[in-house]
Image: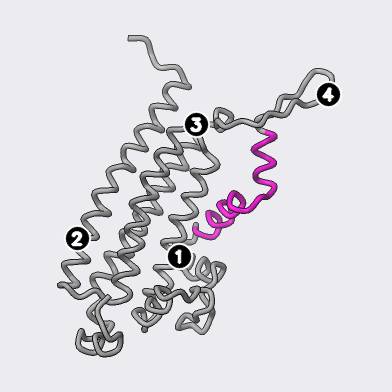
Amino acid sequence: MAPLTSALYDQKVVQEELEKLGELRGEVAKTAEELMARCNGEIFPCDALASAALSRAFNLIDGFGLLVKGGNYQCAVGLLRFQLDNVLRLFGVTTCGDAHGIASDVLTGTPLARIKHDSGQKMHDAYLVELLSERNPWVQDVYRILSGFIHLSDTHFQHMLMQSVQTPDGTRKFHVSDTDNYVPSEHKVNLVRTFATVTRGVVELVQEWASKRDSFGQPQVLRARFKQVV
């Protein structure tokens, strides 16, 4: 059998990483089941928020895989930013003493950016990134890079330049394309691996919440406070 060409090898690595990512769906489902078992039939606000994060994570895994396979790198990066949003917000809420109260406000429409963390800082994205970076220092750089894809910026111009061709006479031919053939395969591999890492972050945060949720109030107290189980 002839050896794989570099391009085919790179595609194979991307596919292998996507398959590994797909296996995380099982971990998401198992974590949801474990959380429900901990709740024992009574779901309070932060339980509901954690469940919503898992549901969103499930959908993002599937959507991300489709985009990568479809050659849509720029949109796939956007979904990585969405997954990081799951981590940032869940981390912010679950590190507050009144996690259920904050989650209740969020579930009824109050933007998290208007709510203060126990530290006294409002939980806007910049603060949540700062907070999480104490635990994972790489978050700040990843957030900055991803934000360049979310907002129309120089990042999109650079990607357009990557698709252009310099002609002998010094001019440049620009292309508007719906494929990501111009993106080096190693970037795609890193993208998938980073998405998997962030997805595991969602799973781990929900597992942490499930393990400590009983310390955030007795069921009878929570029932009285929130009037009814979610």
Q: Report the mark closest to the observer, 3 or 1.
A: 1
Per the model, the C-alpha gap separating discs 4 and 2 is 61 Å
The kind of secondary structure the magenta stretch mainly shows is helix
Residue 121: image x %, image y %? Answer: 53, 80
Sequence-wise first label, 4 or 1:
1
Q: Are marks 2 and 1 in contact (CB under 8 Å)?
A: no
**Are the residues at dot 3 and dot 1 in contact (C-beta closer than 8 Å)?**
no
Pick whichever of labels 3 and 2 is earlier in the sequence.
Answer: 2
Labels 4 and 2 touching (C-beta < 8 A): no
Residue at the image position 50 percent from the left and 57 percent from the top:
138
Q: Amino acid at mark 3?
A: Ser
Real-space Cα distance between discs 4 and 1? 46 Å
Which residue is drawn at the image coordinates 24% and 54% (left, top)?
29
Label 3, label 4: how far apart the Cα atoms are: 28 Å
Instruction: Name the spot of residue 139 as percent of width and height, x first.
Output: 50, 59
What is the secondary structure assignment of the residue under circle 2?
helix
* Magenta region, residue range: 139-161
Judging by the rendered image, the residue that carries numbered circle 2 is 33
Query: Which of pointers 3 and 1 lies earlier in the amino acid sequence?
Result: 1
Q: Is the C-beta separation of discs 4 and 1 under 8 Å?
A: no
* Residue for badge 3: 185
Q: Is residue 29 above or below residue 40?
A: above
**Pointer 4: what residue?**
170
Which quadrant of the view contains residue 45? Answer: bottom left
Residue 140 counted in the magenta span: yes
Residue pointed to by mark 1:
88
> Which quadrant holds residue 168?
top right
Picture residue at 36% right of the left edge, 58% below the top: 201
Q: Name the residue located 39 percent from the left edge and 40 percent from the top edge.
A: 65
Between 111 and 144, which is closer to the camera in this rendering? 111
